[in-house]
Each structure stands twice: as C-alpha cells, then as structure tokens.
Amino acid sequence: MSTASDLHGSAGPYRGSDGTPQGADGRPHGTDGTPHSADGTPHGADGADGTRGADPGFTADVTDGTNGVLAEQLLRLTRRLHRIQKRHLEPLGITPAQSRLLRVVAHYNGGQPPRMADLAARLEVVPRAVTSLVDGLEAAACVRRVPDPANRRVIRIELTDTGRATLRKLRSARTEAAEEILSPLTADQREVLGGLLNTLSGGPEGRA
C-alpha cells in the first residue's frame, strides 16, 4: 500500500492555504520537493544571471576553509564578469576571446606584428585556436595576414584601420561592463580591490 510519503515525496504532503506544496517546516517547495524561496527561486540554485538563489541558510561547506570559499567566490565572479562582458560585446559582433586577441595584436612589443605562434604563446592556447580567432577577425576586416619581409614563408598578423576603430569601441564596452559589476563598491573599495587584484595577478605588468 502506498503511503502519503510515497505519493508526495520526502518533502511531505503539506500544502499552504493557496495549495502551494510545502515542507514540514512550512517553507515553500517545488513540485519536485526542492525547497524554494518565497519568490519561487530554488535555494542554492542559479538564477537567470547565474547568481545564487536568495537562501539565507546557504553557506559554503565548512570543510572548504577560507581559501576554498574564496576560490569559489572568485570563480563565480569570473563567470559573472565573462557573461556581462560578452553581453556588452555582442552589439559589436566580437567575442571576448577575439577582443583579447585584438588587444594583444595592438600592444605586441616585438617590434613588428606578431606571428600566429606568438599569439598562441601570449594567449596560452593551442595554435589552431588562434587560427580560428584570426579567421573571424580577418573576415570582419579587423586584422590581416601579411608576409614577413625577411622571410615570406612566415605570416604575421597586422591590425587594420577597422581593427583600431573596433578597439576603441571595445574599450568603451569594457568600461561599461566594469562599471556594471563594480557599481556596488565605493571609490575607496575599488581602490582596495585594485591593489588586491594586482597582488594576485603578480603586479601591474599590463597584461592583455
């Protein structure tokens, strides 16, 4: 014979006055028995923007320790920053990866345009990934492949006038994305954060 628990799940057969499934503790539950916040957001679940649901009882695993919690917070912030930046770049038809490659080409310090291998080393990706990025940017007329004057078998990647104009737009988009994510911080907090990030990244050496 089926019991009430079998029919309703471990969350219990309780319902509110409006018929909403609830647990024994009176908290709203989803149809699958998952605890929800009052607004219907599952506790601990990611919202539309990737942030955690508003569960006041959500805390990191105590076994993680401070470093583990900080690592998780940094990863979540990185993912959020990537999403925001991607949204601001979409109107320009440029991906975050293409944006970074453009900046590397523009600020390359080798005395002449970089080779594909130079870009792969700087971006820390395999050469075929650079080929795909360059193909897309070349199709958008932002870069062009040019032979090395000293060795015409070597191909270098050169920024075009269109690429320079795109870079100016990218700087504005990055500034808007940064302002969106930093908006909760005061000027003093931003200065402190900048110092901490410089320490973590090994110093302000102007990496792309």
Image (cartoon, grey):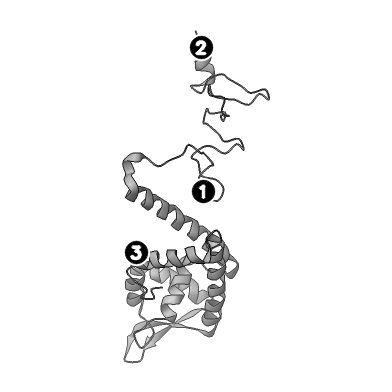
Callout 3 touching callout 2 (CB < 8 Å): no
Residue at 55 percent across and 77 percent down: it is 166
**Sequence-first tag of 3 and 2:** 2
> How many residues crowd around disc 3 within 10 Å: few (fewer than 14), some, or many (20 or more)?
few
Question: For numbered disc 3, what is the local secondary structure?
Answer: helix
On residue 114, which mark appears? Answer: none
* In this picture, residue 173 sits left or right of residue 78: right
User: Residue 40 location in percent, x, y?
Assistant: 60, 36
* In this picture, residue 196 sits left or right of residue 8: left
Mark 1 — residue? 51
Single out the residue that lies furthest toward the right: 18
User: Residue 148 location in percent, x, y?
Assistant: 35, 88
Question: In 3D space, how far apart are the residues under numbered discs 1 and 2 (Cα atoms)?
Answer: 37 Å
Question: For numbered disc 1, what is the local secondary structure?
Answer: loop
Residue at 43 percent across and 65 percent down: it is 192
Position above or below: 27 against 142: above
Callout 1 touching callout 3 (CB < 8 Å): no
Q: Nearer the viewer, mark 1 or mark 3?
A: 3
Mark 2 — residue? 3
Amino acid on which the number 3 mark rests in the picture: Leu
Amino acid on which the number 1 mark rests in the picture: Thr
Q: Nearer the viewer, mark 3 or mark 2?
A: 3
> How many residues crowd around disc 2 within 10 Å: few (fewer than 14), some, or many (20 or more)?
few
Question: Looking at the image, which is closer to me, 135 or 178?
Answer: 178
**Count of all numbered marks drawn on residues in the image:** 3
Mark 3 — residue? 200
